Image (cartoon, rainbow, N blue to C red):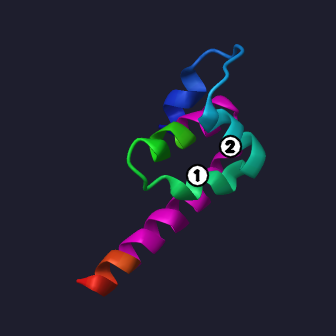
Amino acid sequence: SYAIGRLIPQKKLNLKAIDWVKRYGAAATALAWLPLIGDALCVAAGWLRMNWLAVLAFMTAGRLARYIVVASFA
């Protein structure tokens, strides 16, 4: 999703996902595990040309936390 965001041409867009990522930075992509919303946040991070290592770290941390919680209930 991040890579797709990098491919979208830079023009004025007014989307909530972009506002969230602008406000909270790469940390917003920790919610990448959420259906639909997470993909939009990752695309927005790519469109904003955020540091891919920071985005990758937060995406990984968010998904890891989710799987730890799910595994603890199993």
Q: Which residue of the protein is positioned furthest toward the right in this rendering?
A: 23
Q: Are marks 1 and 2 in contact (CB under 8 Å)?
A: yes
Picture mark count? 2
Q: Is residue 54 left or right of residue 30?
A: right
User: Which quadrant of the figure has residue 18?
Assistant: top right
Mark 1–mark 2 Cα distance, whole angstroms, equals 8 Å
Residue at screen point 75% across, 40% down: 22
The vertical placement of 65 against 32, above or below, is below
Question: Which residue type carries mark 2?
Answer: Val
Q: Which residue is mark 2?
A: 21
**Image coordinates for residue 64, horizontal then vertical, percent:** 45, 70
Residue at screen point 60% across, 37% down: 17
Q: Which residue is mark 1?
A: 29
Residue at screen point 54% across, 42% down: 42
The vertical placement of 51 against 4, above or below, is below
Range drawn in magenta = 43-68
The reply to whether residue 60 is in sight is yes
- Considering the image in quadrants, where does the C terminus appear? bottom left
Q: Earlier in the sequence, mark 1 or mark 2?
A: 2
